[in-house]
Amino acid sequence: MTQVHFTLNSGEVQSIIEHSVKEDVSKNILSTVFNQLIKNQRTEYIQADDYQRSESRQSQRNGYYERDFTTRVGTPRLKVPRTRDGDFSPTVFERY
């Protein structure tokens, strides 16, 4: 079983809560958690941190694209990371 560890900046979460409409708070927190999770999955796939040189590197980072993700809470827009080889697919989305 894969274990996922990531850190959320408490200031960022507090800012989301303060600047969100009551209905959008949970949607914004959910999108922040999913974005961080997907970003960490890409780092695991590449086998190197940002700007780190490694001989075990699988690919290179290649920006982000936006995608809507429908949940019971709402439909947050996620920033999905890409890799240069195009083989990375986050586990959050099902393969078509």
Image (cartoon, grey):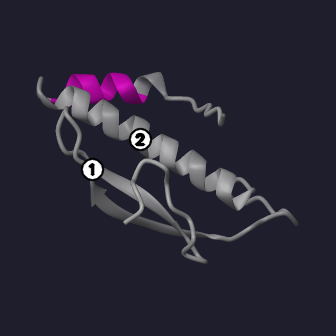
Quadrant in which residue 27 is drawn: top left
Which residue position holds label 1? 69
In the rendered structure, the answer to whether residue 54 lies left or right of residue 38 reads right
Return the residue found at the far bottom.
Answer: 85
Magenta stretch encompasses residue 76:
no
Q: Residue 11, position in %: x, y?
A: 42, 24
Magenta stretch encompasses residue 16:
yes
Range covered by the magenta-colored residues: 12-20
Which residue position holds label 2? 34
Is residue 53 placed above or below 37 in the rendered structure? below
Quadrant in which residue 16 is drawn: top left
Is residue 6 placed above or below 43 in the rendered structure? above
Return the residue found at the far right.
Answer: 55
Q: Residues within 10 Å of mark 1 (few under 14, many from 20)?
A: some
* Tag 2 and tag 1, C-beta contact below 8 Å: yes
Query: Along the polypeptide, which appears first: circle 2 or circle 1?
Result: 2
Residue type pointed to by label 1: Phe
Residue type pointed to by label 2: Phe
Q: Residue 67, position in %: x, y?
A: 29, 59
Quadrant in which residue 55 is drawn: bottom right
Q: Secondary structure beneath disc 2? A: helix
For image coordinates 74% across by 68% down, the residue present is 58
In the rendered structure, the answer to whether residue 17 lies left or right of residue 74 reads right
Q: Residues within 10 Å of mark 2 (few under 14, many from 20)?
A: some
